[in-house]
Image (spheres, rainbow, N blue to C red):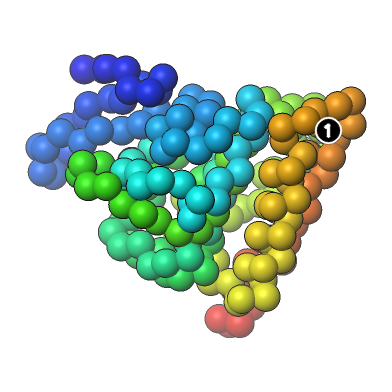
């Protein structure tokens, strides 16, 4: 069964375990998610969210057709990522790719969450060097079964880049697409560096 909510499709699916119906938000494009949580729509293919600036919103379990990067500035419990459930700790970062499911089922509860998110459409990077680089960012894979636990300094680096990227989105000119893609690649390279450091420290 499908119904419309705020311009995005909500699918009712039945869990094999609980047989209880769970709503899944189909994020066809970045602004399906923006409209659902009440974030400003600044660009058709890129969305940068500072959750602290939003009014109260509700959890959502999302089926993504876009890439997403989420930074939690508080601990979020029992989030779904593929077939697993996990807790996202403060200053942790997680990533999703098209075709993946992640988030937390909507219980109807209004929440005030804190943190940042970056969503971007694969169309944005089509034909660019970044498109060819994407397979090397293995942290977008379900096989990466742990979030990135950032230091305060690492978080600040990523957030500063997100803030600058967000300023580029409303007033586009001929150079804007190149600048946006350059910032995306810089953010993804920093995340790759931080993940590599986290994994090496575990050896």
Q: What is the x, y in percent for residue 152?
A: 61, 76
Q: Is residue 47 above or below residue 82?
A: above
Image quarter of residue 187: bottom right
Residue lying at the far left of the rendered structure: 19
Which residue is drawn at the image coordinates 73% and 55% (left, top)? 161
Q: Quadrant of the N terminus?
A: top left
Q: Quadrant of the C terminus?
A: bottom right
**50 horizontally vs 89: left or right:** right
Badge 1 marks a residue whose secondary structure is: helix
Q: Is residue 98 visible?
A: no
- Taking depth in this image into account, of 125 and 46 the one nearest to the observer is 46
Residue 89 percent across, percent down from the top left: 42, 69
Against 109, residue 157 (above or below) is below
Residue 151 visible in the displayed image: yes
For the residue carrying disc 1, how many other residues have a C-alpha within 10 Å: few (<14), some (14-19), or many (20+)?
some
Decide if residue 150 is on the left or right side of residue 76.
right
Q: Nearer the viewer, residue 158 or 26?
A: 158
Identify the residue shown where x is 55% and y is 51%: 50
Q: Is residue 35 left or right of residue 9?
A: right
Q: Which residue is mark 1?
A: 176
Q: Nearer the viewer, residue 148 or 25?
A: 25
Residue 105 pos. (x, y %)? 26, 44
- The answer to which of 94 and 160 lies nearer the viewer is 160
Residue at 71%, 66% in the rendered image:
157
Is 143 placed above or below 130 here? below
The correct choice, above or below, for 23 with respect to 184 in the image is above
Q: Quadrant of residue 170?
A: top right
Residue located 56% across and 46% down the image: 49
The tally of labels here is: 1
Q: Position of residue 166 (x, y in %)?
A: 69, 44
């Amino acid at each position: 069964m499908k119904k419309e909510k705020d311009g995005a499709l909500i699918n009712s699916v039945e869990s094999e375990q609980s047989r209880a119906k769970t709503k899944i938000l189909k994020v066809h494009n970045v602004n399906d998610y923006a409209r659902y949580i009440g974030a400003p729509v600044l660009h058709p293919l890129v969305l940068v969210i500072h959750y602290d600036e939003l009014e109260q919103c509700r959890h959502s379990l999302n089926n993504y057709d876009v890439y997403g990067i989420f930074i939690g500035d508080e601990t979020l419990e029992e989030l779904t990522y593929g077939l697993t459930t996990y807790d996202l700790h403060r200053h942790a970062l997680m990533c999703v790719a098209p075709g993946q499911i992640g988030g937390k089922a909507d219980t109807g509860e209004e929440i005030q969450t804190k943190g940042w998110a970056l969503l971007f459409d694969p169309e944005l990077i089509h034909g660019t060097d970044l498109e060819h680089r994407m397979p090397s960012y293995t942290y977008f894979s379900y096989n990466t079964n742990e979030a990135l636990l950032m230091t305060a300094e690492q978080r600040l680096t990523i957030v500063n880049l997100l803030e600058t990227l967000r300023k580029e989105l409303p007033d586009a000119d001929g150079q804007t697409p190149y600048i946006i893609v350059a910032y995306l690649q810089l953010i993804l390279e920093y995340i790759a560096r931080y993940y590599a450091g986290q994994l090496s420290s575990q050896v």
